[in-house]
Image (cartoon, helix red, strand yellow):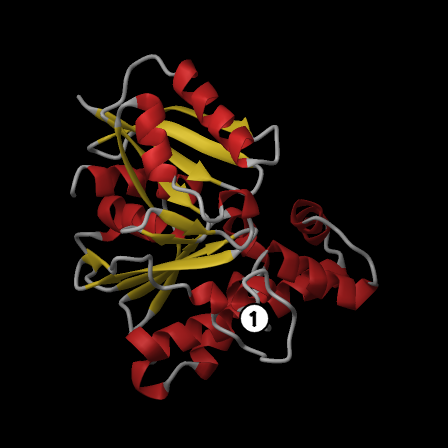
Amino acid sequence: MEKVLSLDIGASSIKSGLVDINGLISQEKKTIIKEESYNGFIEAVKSIMAGISEKPAGITAALPGGYDIEKDEIFAPNLHILNGKHIRNDLENIFDIKVMAENDANLAAYGEYVFGDKKSVKNMVFCTLGSGFGGGLILNGKLLQSNITLFEIGHMSIDFQGRQCGCGRRGCLDEYCSTSGLKEIYKNITGKEIAPVELGELASSGDSNALEAFKDYGRLLAGAFANMAALFCPDKIKYGGGLSELSMYYEEVMQEEFNKIIFPAYKGRVKIERAVLKNQAGMAGGAALFFGL
């Protein structure tokens, strides 16, 4: 059975795996980008290719930013080493293999839909909660696409005088609903900086400041999700990414707040659920796109 090498590119590492047409992932690994440069990125991909046991039918790249499909150019606010680069052309020339690329959140949305919800819903918003806040939209059973990647919901501003975002604007959801946003909430409460994993450990022990930080985060997410519901009224809003692993500390508050503030006509029509594919959704989505599922 043919398999595609799916690359899910992060700020400092690349998750990879061989994925078949059924979405099954093998030889999954995480590779650190050792040198903070485009050459360092290319070397990391070469290392991944050298380590797999069979030649794939192609490569898919889930990119952390906007991607001009026609010009093969990237704008990555949180990974500047990729900005302006021609990743599809470069990887095809290096490996003599078909390459496809898309925004990481779009591919995560597509993977979650094809291998998780295709039989039950037609319209779905998918959000990634991690170092950034991204999203993808499934509309009438299809991934919303154009000649450039769409649905940059992380760069919707909720405060035009707010925090500076890497995209150049202020107040983007990317700055509030991401790991940096959660850390900032806790810092405003305690004056201390802490990593989300440690914050989760504090919350599990009953620390009141940690629990309050997660509640505040849940309310912010509810506001973001209510905005998306007002725009698209999807059957589901699903969320994945690293911070979804800590959802037990903010999910209840998020759901309660969402039900309070959603556009009244849509109340009861939009479900919020955690992704079933978790951090594998982007790799699965790459395969779904490559195989035309």
Neighbor class of circle 1 (other Cα within 10 Å; few <14, some 14-19, many 20+) is some
Against 109, residue 283 (above or below) is above
Q: Position of residue 238 (x, y in %)?
A: 38, 58
Residue at 17% across / 64% down in the picture?
Answer: 140
Q: Position of residue 35 (x, y in %)?
A: 61, 30
**Numbered circles on residues, count:** 1
Q: Secondary structure at mark 1?
A: loop
Label 1: which residue? Answer: 169
Residue at 59% across / 72% down in the picture?
Answer: 170
Q: Amino acid at mark 1?
A: Arg
Which of the 4 quarters of the picture holds residue 277? top left
On the rendered image, what quadrant is the C terminus found in?
A: top left
**Taking the image as drawn, is residue 132 in sight?**
yes
From the viewer's perspective, tell me whether residue 148 is left or right of residue 33. left
Is residue 177 or residue 204 the one in the foreground? 177
Q: Position of residue 124 (x, y in %)?
A: 28, 62
Residue at 17% across / 21% down in the picture?
Answer: 1
**Taking the image as drawn, is residue 268 in sight?**
no
